[in-house]
Amino acid sequence: MTKADLILIGAGLSGAAFLAHLLRDHRGLRGRVAVVEPSSRLGAGLAYGTEDPAHRVNVAAGRMSLFPDRPEHFLDWLAASGALARDPGARGADGTLHPRRIAFGAYVDESLRAEIAASSVQVEHLRTAAIAVSRTGRGWQVALGGGATIDAPLLVLAVGHTAPDLPGVLAGLAGDPRLVADPWRPDALARIAADAPVLVVGTGLTGCDVIASLRLRGHRGPIVAVSRRGLLPRPRTRLPVEAWGDFTDPVCATALSLLRRVRAAIAEAATLGRPWEDVIAQLRVQGGTVWRALPVHERRRLLRHLRPFWDVHRFQCAPQIDAVVRAGLSAGWLSVMAATPVSATPDGALLRVGLRSRGGGGRETRTVAVAAIVNCTGPGHRSVVETHPVLHSLAAAGHLRADPCRLGIDVDLDSRVLDAAGRAWPGLFVAGPLARGTHGELMGLPQVALQPRAVAATVAALWPAESQHRTRDG
Ligand SMILES: Cc1cc2nc3c(=O)[nH]c(=O)nc-3n(C[C@H](O)[C@H](O)[C@H](O)COP(=O)(O)OP(=O)(O)OC[C@H]3O[C@@H](n4cnc5c(N)ncnc54)[C@H](O)[C@@H]3O)c2cc1C
C-alpha cells in the first residue's frame, strides 16, 4: 500500500481505541487505512505490552472497557478468554479485579481485530516505525523505517509515551549498567542482584511497579525511593466510586481557588459519608472544562505545585502492588523520602548519590550508596516534540508545536494539530495523552477511549468521498 485514505501512526491503546471506534461507530465507511506500528500486538503499547507478571492494571477491570458504552466488555472478555482462570492473583483483598496488564493488551488486540474483520475498510498493519512526516499537495507523506513511503489525506498521530527523561544529575551515568534509565524496557531490572541496595527515583505508579517487580524477582536488598515530595499513591478507601461535587459552575480562574474548592468539596463529601475518591472522580469527569478555564500561567502553576498531589490521588496502585509497598515500609526493607538527587558518583562497585531533603535548606543532607539506580520519573512528554523523530520532523517544518505547558502537542478542541502559527490542520490529529495540553486529564481510561472516539467521529466526517465507492479489496 503506497496510498491510503488514512494513516495511523502508533497503535498502543490510544491508536487502537481510535481505530476500533472509527470502524465500529461508522460502519458504512469504505477505503484504506494504513496502521504504522512496529509491534505485532495492536493496542498493547507501552502500558499493556509488558510481560512482567507483577504489572497489573491500576484501574479495576470493571472500569477498563475499550468501549465506554459497553462497560462490561473487558470483564466479559476476561471470563470468556480464560485469562482470569490463569491469573488467580487478579482478585485483590478488596474483591476487585486487577488482572495483569498484558491481559488488557490481549483484550484490546482481539477487540480491534474483531472490528477490522467486521468492517468494509481495508486495514493494513505495517510492522515498522515511521521516521518522518512531510506535507504533500493533498495531505501527508509518511517515511517508513525500511525506506518506503505512504501518502494519505488524513493522518492520526498516536505515538504515546517516550522513555523517561533522565534527571540532569544522573546524565553523567548514562551508559553505566548500574543505571536503569528506562524501566519500561523488557528485562530492565534483570541485572540488579537480589541483595543489591537500590535507589528508585520517583515514587509514582512506575516506582511502585518497580518495587513490586523487584520483590517478585526475589530481590531482598534495601530499597530507597525518593521524589520531590515523597508522596506515594494513596491507598484506596472505598469502592465503587461515584463522581460527586461540581467544579464547573462557576469554573475557577486560578490554581489556588481550584485547590480551595477541591478541599471544601472533600470536607463536604465527608459529612455526607462519601470518600474523597468521589470528589476526585468528578474532577476527572469535569477535568477538561476545569483545565481549559485556567489561563496558561495558572495551568503552569497547577502543574508546578499541585500535580504531585493530583497524581497520588488520581492514580492509585493495584491493591496487589500497594500491599507490597506497604509491607516494605512496615518491614523496613523499603524507605521513602522527600528528597532530590543532587550528585551521583561511581565509587568502586557502588554509586554514591547525594540527596537533598525537602526542607533541608537546599543543602545535601544525606548520601546513599547503592548498587543500582532506577529512573522512574514518568514518560518524557516534556521533550517529546524534540526527541520523537516524527514529531521532530513536523515541528522542524513548522507543521506542529509543543503545547504551552509542555505536556505534548498543541491541538484544538477537535484534537487537530496546530501549526507553528497556531492554525489547525484540517486532516492532522492527535489521539491519546499527547493532546493533554488542550484537554487536561487524558492519561488513563476512560479518557483514553473517549478522546480517540471523538477524533474518530471528526475523521469519519472528513472521509474522502471517492473512497466510499471502493470495495474492501479494490
Ligand atoms: C506504565 C503505565 C501503566 C499504565 N497502567 C494503566 C492502567 O492500569 N489503567 C489505566 O487506565 N491506565 C493506565 N496507564 C495509562 C494509559 O492507559 C496510557 O496512557 C496508555 O498507554 C496510552 O496509550 P498510547 O497508545 O497513547 O501510548 P503508548 O502505549 O505509548 O503507545 C504508543 C504506540 O505508538 C507506537 N509508536 C511510537 N512511535 C512510533 C513510530 N515512530 N512509528 C510507529 N509507531 C510508533 C509505539 O510502538 C506504541 O505501540 C498506564 C500508563 C503507563 C505509562
Image (cartoon, rainbow, N blue to C red):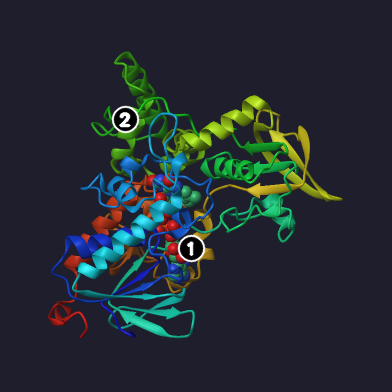
User: What amino acid is at disc 2?
Assistant: Pro
Relative to 458, residue 394 above or below: below
Mark 2 sits on what residue?
240
Q: Residue at x 36, y 32 (%)?
A: 280
Task: Specify whether 58 is left or right of 52.
Answer: left
Image quadrant of ligand 1? bottom left
Q: Residue at x 19, y 66 (%)?
A: 460
Of the numbered discs 2 and 1, the one sitting upstream in the chain is 2
Q: Nearer the viewer, residue 57 or 404?
A: 57
Task: Specify whether 363 is left or right of 207.
Answer: right
Mark 1 sits on what residue?
385
Task: Specify whether 386 is left or right of 135.
Answer: right
CB under 8 Å between discs 2 and 1: no
Q: Position of residue 335 (x, y in %)?
A: 67, 31
Task: Specify whether 243 is left or right of 40.
Answer: left
SS at circle 2: loop
Q: Position of residue 88 (x, y in %)?
A: 45, 41
Q: Nearer the viewer, residue 13 or 447?
A: 13
SS at circle 1: helix
User: What amino acid is at disc 1?
Assistant: Val
Q: The N terminus is located in which quarter?
A: bottom left
